[in-house]
Image (cartoon, helix red, strand yellow):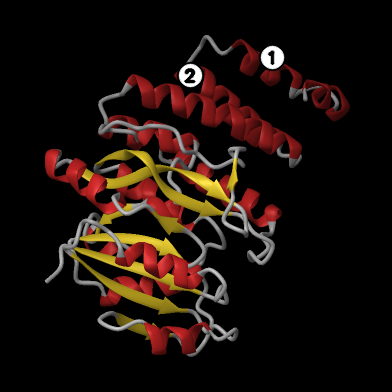
Amino acid sequence: MARVTVLLTSYNHLAFLPEAVESVRRQTYRDFDLLVLDDGSTDGSREWVAENIGGAQIYFSERNLGTYGLLNAGLERATGEWIAILNDDDVWEEDKLARQMALIDAEPRLGLVGALGHFLDDAGGRIGADLGIVYDPMPPGDHFATLVLTNAFVTSSVLFRREALGSDTRFDATLYGLGDYDLWLRIAERWWSAKAEGDIVGYRFHASQASRDESRLVEETSAIHERLFARRAELLEARSNDPALIQSLALLAAQLGTQRMWRGDRRGAREAYRASLKLDPGRSKTRLRLALSWLPSKVFRLLR
């Protein structure tokens, strides 16, 4: 039984799929098995996989399950202690798994390991901009407080323990675009996390990428943050009032207060602002926003 199962997701990216598969095949770390998951492709990807990928498990979904439904189908079939994910339009450098497994072997508290990398256009050229994706270094440690505020892991860079959360180590398939962030948060709440250094993952932006409904992503981010806000007392008690988590939750509460104001929920906004100030009384801007929440909306909007 291989130690790592690689879940390679495929959906209508035949132009990029062979390069992704080759980047897995050339890994210097060899204790892995490959599971190709196709989500009902209609562009010839299924046929290419059937003809060109030997020695790997293949799962063809007869209907489109969506990103997280497909990954859950992969988790049901995976046998490795660790799970790696590679989307069909991204690529790995040959030492990607080796660098990550070296971190894992050195630190048994790790449950989630990402990696540093770069960005590619549809022709394979490098893009210099950060494009809103977090590729910052992260040494092994408890980084839950960081993840409370931002999704710090690119999905195609991640290795995570298959049973990090027991039977609950699954993606929330009801989510549209942030099922990965939701799972990373749940793992990081219980386990250490890290990123392997080195330019070892290529994340591609291209014309044929599935379009993203930005409004849905904003709604999902807000929903995840609202859930964390509701659990703030539980989280702080479980973590002995960790100062970093206090600061993260204070900022999160302040951000939620402003989001609620924009939605016209003044009472909810004041609740969040007060909670933020209770966590960190020194937040002067939050105190100002709380005061302005009693004034007409047009005045509050001047704080953009």
Give the residue displayed 67% in from the left and 37% down from the top. Answer: 259
Quadrant assignment for the C terminus: top right
Which sits in the foreground, 152 or 22? 22
On screen, residue 187 above or below 9: above
Give the residue displayed 52% in from the left and 9% down from the top: 282
Q: Position of residue 169 (x, y in %)?
A: 29, 61
Decide which of 185, 228 is in the foreground and name it. Answer: 185
Q: Is residue 171 visible?
A: no
Horizontally, is 252 left or right of 172 in the view?
Answer: right
| Picture disc at residue 278 | 2
- In percent of the image, x 48 and y 38: which residue is there? 229
Q: Secondary structure at mark 1?
A: helix
- For the N terminus, the quadrant is bottom left
- Disc 1 packing (10 Å; few <14; some 14–19; many ≥20): few
Mark 1 vs 2, N-terminal side: 2
Is 134 or 223 nearer to us in this picture? 134
Q: Position of residue 206 (x, y in %)?
A: 64, 59
Please indicate, yes or no, whether residue 103 appears anywhere in the rendered image. yes
**How far is the residue under mark 1 from the one under mark 2?**
14 Å
Q: Residue at x 50, y 78 (%)?
A: 65
Q: Quadrant of residue 109?
A: top left
Where 66 sits versus 225, above or below?
below
Q: Are marks 1 and 2 in contact (CB under 8 Å)?
A: no
Total numbered badges shown on the rendered structure = 2
Within-10-Å neighbours for mark 2: few <14, some 14–19, many 20+: few
| Label 2: element kind | helix
Where residue 134 sits: x, y (%)?
50, 39
Q: Which mark is residue 187?
A: none
Location of mark 1 (residue)? 288
**Three-letter code, disc 2:** Lys
Would residue 65 be found to the left or right of residue 263 on screen? left
The amino acid type found where label 1 is placed reads: Leu
